[in-house]
Amino acid sequence: MELEIQPFVLMHVSTAYGLDMGYTICEYNLHPCPFFLIIHLCHSCVNFIFCSLFLSSWDAAYESELQIFQESGDAGEIWFGEESMIRLIRWMEKQKIPLDSSVLDIGTGNGVLLVELAKCGYTNLTGIDYSPSAIQLSQNIIEKEGLSNIKLQVKDFLIPAAELSGFQICIDKGTFDAISLNPDNAAEKRKQYVKSLCTVLKMEGFFLITSCNWTKEELLNEFREGFEILEELPTPKFCFGGRVGNSVTALVFQRKK
């Protein structure tokens, strides 16, 4: 699928268009909090970067989604859309990942990915999020679905607890992006993320990441220590200014022995 981005949505160009690298910024008001949409133009790709205007407002955002769920039953936003979940589950099914494999959803948010995995028969599922409101929302959604094989914990992935270890599958759908946008020493937090991942993921375990911030090459560099690339999953393409790129990057890594 290819999406044509029309130029009339542009608000500001921070670097002259046509250079090898530049950023074009559009403003979008996505429920429940506003975002900047930054279109990253580099040598061979175009990438979306979602940058929250209020990086400290995640918990407030999930409080809002929790209230909406309690009032209307709406589970809220699915990061990167339903197709992103289908993409990951299809890969797991194609690889014949055993249904009792231990799976960790890093930054589970509303827990919808875990719900879909449970519906597909996976039985050893754990979701963590640093936001108590996100975990409460996830718990409410899981209870509504009548599922009992999903464990939820309020945890900061950058400070992994001792019990978070030995997972066969780790999934990240936007959490590494959010950490990368943290204005407080993001580079060091990215390094800590990799260290935490090495702590929780068992040797030869799989790491599935979906990102709207990073290209394939950039992610390969970020996870070069301790991981090897297995596969790039197909994602939607779009055209902007005569260039074709991916709206998101989806990769499968394996932890080295």
Image (cartoon, grey):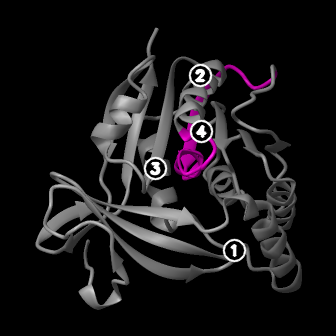
Where residue 4 sits: x, y (%)?
Answer: 23, 80
Where is 141 relative to 4, above or below?
above
Q: Amino acid at mark 4?
A: Asn
Secondary structure of the residue carrying numbered label 1: loop
Residue at numbered disc 1: 76
Of the two numbered discs 4 and 1 on the same chain, state the one appearing first in sequence: 1
- Residue at the image position 81 percent from the left and 75 percent from the top: 64
Q: Which residues are magenta?
A: 163-186
The span from disc 2 to disc 4 (Cα, nearest Å) is: 16 Å
The span from disc 4 to disc 1 (Cα, nearest Å) is: 30 Å
In this orientation, does residue 98 appear? no
Of the two numbered discs 3 and 4 on the same chain, state the one appearing first in sequence: 4
Give me the disc on residue 195.
2
Where is 254 relative to 65, above or below?
above
Label 1 Cα neighbours within 10 Å, binned few <14 / some 14-19 / many ≥20: some
Residue at numbered disc 3: 210
Comparing 112 with 76, the one in front is 76
Q: Nearer the viewer, mark 2 or mark 1?
A: 2
Of the two numbered discs 1 and 3 on the same chain, state the one appearing first in sequence: 1
Contact? badges 2 and 1 (CB < 8 Å): no
- Classify residue 121 as left or right of residue 152: left
Q: Is residue 167 magenta?
A: yes
Residue at numbered disc 4: 185
Secondary structure of the residue carrying numbered label 3: strand
The span from disc 3 to disc 4 (Cα, nearest Å) is: 22 Å
Where is 42 relative to 122, above or below?
below
Q: Nearer the viewer, mark 4 or mark 1?
A: 4
Secondary structure of the residue carrying numbered label 4: loop
